[in-house]
Amino acid sequence: MNSLIERLINFLMYICVIIFVFSTSGIIIYILFNGINKLSPSLFFGNLRTIDALLMKKNVIDGIYPALIGSFLLVILTLIIAVPIGILTGIYLSEYVKKKTFLNIIFDILASVPSIIIGLFGLSMVILINKYFKTNVYPCLLISSISLAFLILPYIIRATQINLESIPFSIRIISITMGASKIQNIFYVLLPYSIHGIISGILLSCARVISDVAVIMLTGGVIFYGIPKSLLDPFEAIAYYIFFLSAEYRTENELLKVFGASFVLLVLCLILFAASEFFGKTAKKLSMIR
């Protein structure tokens, strides 16, 4: 009886895996097939000459170039905010805290918070700043980056904590036995040893930032604005461009632009996932060699 139940469960698991693989592959192939035909300079720069757009002589109105630049700036600024905090917090959890249950629960809750709630937090932050500091701060690139930093912090913290905790004891005590302090051991031995795994987690976080819509929509994302000149300007983002145009398209050409932009976003995410996998495997190989 138990054998029959186990076989049934295994069969159901195989069916679920097949459904998942075929459905995901179907979505990806559909987007790639419909989007690749739309790839052209006009998708990125609209009616402008490529050189004029790249030199910022004119604003690109009907292309995704400003959205790509806005997404790139958003990712960079978000990582500048989140990576130091996330890595230092992960070090603290791994190396200094003995009873981690309470803190682990807090970060697990933060990781499970829907992105729309993080977006509302960013919007509330703008309202409170204007109310109590009497400044003209509006949803912008900086507010969006701060909000997205909260969104990806749990992933960076967990990546750092798990990779540090997986370091063998023999590696941990080498520099300690030679007279190094705990801080020196962390920054000269443990972090370099686990850096590939940490980078893998950071790259996965980049994919989350570049593909999120809810936070961007509430904290500074706009359509047809151009490249932001400062951190307090609104900005375009490729994910929000796809969301807006797919909901508001009026012609077949605009719908095809959605597929083209989706193709570009999908390729960017696949590159980040591949890079994350590469660094993850590199970390595993290095740990086996060492």
Image (cartoon, rainbow, N blue to C red):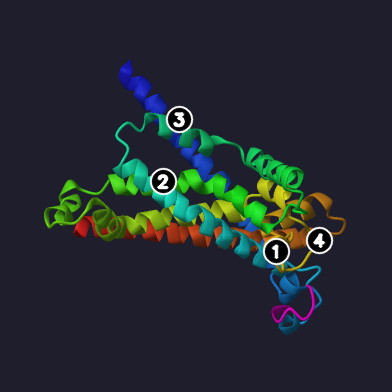
Amino acid type of the residue tagged 3 in the rendering: Leu
Left or right? Give the position of 191 relative to 120.
left
Q: Quadrant of residue 158?
A: top left
3D distance between C-alphas at marks 1 and 3: 43 Å
Q: Are marks 1 and 3 in contact (CB under 8 Å)?
A: no
Residue 254: which numbered mark, if any? 4
Identify the residue position indicated by label 2 in the image. Answer: 89
3D distance between C-alphas at marks 3 and 4: 42 Å
3D distance between C-alphas at marks 1 and 4: 15 Å
3D distance between C-alphas at marks 4 and 2: 45 Å
* Front position among marks 1 and 4: 1
Say whether residue 58 is magenta.
yes
Residue 12: which numbered mark, if any? 3
* Front position among marks 3 and 4: 4
Q: Nearer the viewer, residue 134 or 183?
A: 134
Q: Say which label, 2 or 1, has the lower sequence index.
A: 1
Left or right? Give the position of 27 relative to 108.
right
Identify the residue position indicated by label 1 in the image. Answer: 67
Residue 203 in the image, given as x and y percentages of width and height: 47, 57
Residue at horizontal 67%, vertical 58%?
A: 141
